[in-house]
Image (spheres, coloured by chain):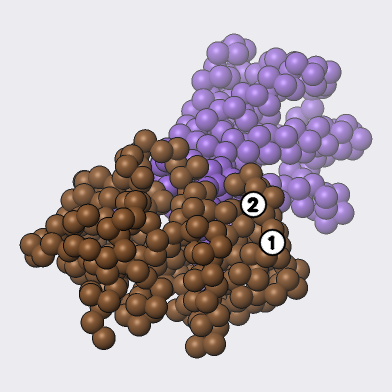
Amino acid sequence: MIVAQVSSIDVSLGEVAGSVALVALAAAVSFWRRAELEGDIAVALVRSFIQLTAIGYVIKVIFEQDELVFVFALIAVMVLFGAIQARARAKRVPHAFWPLLIALSVAGGGTLALVVALGIFDPEPRYLVPVGGMVVGNSMTAAAVALNRLGDEVEDARLKLEATLALGATAREAAAPFVRRSLRSGMIALVDSTKTTGLIFFPGTMVGMLLAGADPTDAVRLQLILLYVLLGSVALAGLIATSLAYRNFFTPAHQLREPEVETPS
Amino acid sequence: MSSRFDNERVVLGGPADNAAVLFELEDVWLRRGGRDVLAGLTAHIPAGATSVVGPSGSGKSTLLRLLNRLADPDRGTVAYRGRSLLDHDVLELRREVSLVPQLPALLEGTVGTNLEYAARLAGKDGDGSRCLHLAGLDRTFAQRDVGKLSVGEQQRAMLARALVQSPRVLLLDEPTSALDEVARDAVEEALQGLRGERDLSLVLVTHDPAQARRLGDWVVRVERGKAVDAGRAADVLVA
């Protein structure tokens, strides 16, 4: 069981403001090379400040209340917004919202239940909130990438799919190669970063703990736990999202549905 | 047997007189992309070899897709051997009524793995070499990567893949459109041979009246989503 020790650092708003100089550098690069990202960078700057500040206060309240019901509520909201956000990346998948919502719910809830059941973390808000946030965030990214790929694969291979269905294959059999590749593309980024962690980059949790003055070996062990937990949750989210979403391309009679005509916005 | 069409012409006689009716399409409508691709099509397709002819965009390929339920009509009925298609198990129907699409679309891998896949779906052992031969390819093609085949070779591999399932009806959508004259003659010869050897019925979509005459005993002419004529090839397709 992980035991938290009191170790914290004080960060002033002035120090945060100082780091904005690097954002200005990013905007300057964009302007200089005409990447046309200055507006997006400004939006990112403002949104990240507001969103993180807001969630910081929310987490503070949850920690003070020390009630699991608030943790569940926070995770549920994150899952809901995660599904909405991921759906925007999966435009070519019909009715992608429900597969994503179910995938993120199971990945988030299941992973947290598992880490508690395995005795890795105590069922306390100070552990479940940050771990839940990481799990839902990474699961959302993986599910979005997987369904984005699935939509492209199916639409690009309609002839091949129909030719396979024409042989008497079920929708599941016909879609299997595309589902497999989509799941792989959803998982591959985290798998690759896990392979290179410590060699090419230091992951966020470890950096945060080192900055907060934790013992490096503790920082490394906690980071390893989180990486392994994330691998499991990302695989679960990708599996559920692709396994549910591919069905929406087919009718119950194993026919490929006509692509939805996009209405002009 | 008689068939009644919108132009009130009643087509009698021909090889279908004594042949069982395979498919009956009754007032079939299908709308796609904002237009009626099939607009009240009524036709009978007998056992044997039937050619479906007509201009591009007349609904020939769509008609073929209805016959093994890759699509269902918005209105109207389609029956196979006297029973509505909806009453057949769709997967069994597709293994019995096999469709070879116009554009080749093989699975990744070799021709052999494609044949094995199709045979496994149909629960058949399937003599792959024999099917390759019937489709005009020699047995070495089983080891060939599908990505390295010409379009014509892929089209024949698609035919072999369908044959390995031992279907009772073969639906062919412009099966020789990508082939040169020699290859086309070889496939046509193979199809003629198959009919005799396997008691196989063919429904062939073609834009080529000469091919329709060569391969089809019975002809259905489709225009603007309707069957406007049907009968013996010699009667419908006047040279």
Residue situated furthest bottom in the rendering: B181
Q: Looking at the picture, tell me which residue is in the foreground, A124 or A96.
A: A96
- Crowding near the residue tagged with mark 2, few <14, some 14–19, many ≥20 C-alpha atoms within 10 Å: many
Pinpoint residue A62: horizontal percent, then vertical percent: 57, 19
Chain letter for the brown colouring in the rendering: B
* Residue A162 visible in the snapshot: no
Residue type at mark 1 is: Gly
Q: Chain of mark 2?
A: B
- Image height check: is A78 above or below B102? above
Residue at figure coordinates x 65%, y 18% from the top left:
A125
Quarter of the picture holding the N terminus of chain B: bottom left
Pinpoint residue A71: horizontal percent, then vertical percent: 58, 19
Q: Looking at the picture, tell me which residue is in the foreground, A160 or B168.
A: B168
What color is chain A drawn in? purple
- Crowding near the residue tagged with mark 1, few <14, some 14–19, many ≥20 C-alpha atoms within 10 Å: many
User: Which residue does the numbered mark 1 point to in the structure image?
Assistant: B128
Query: Circle 2 sits in a helix, a strand or a loop, which is it?
Result: helix
Residue at figure coordinates x 42%, y 47% from the top left:
A255
Question: Which disc is residue B119 wearing?
Answer: 2
Residue type at mark 2 is: Ala
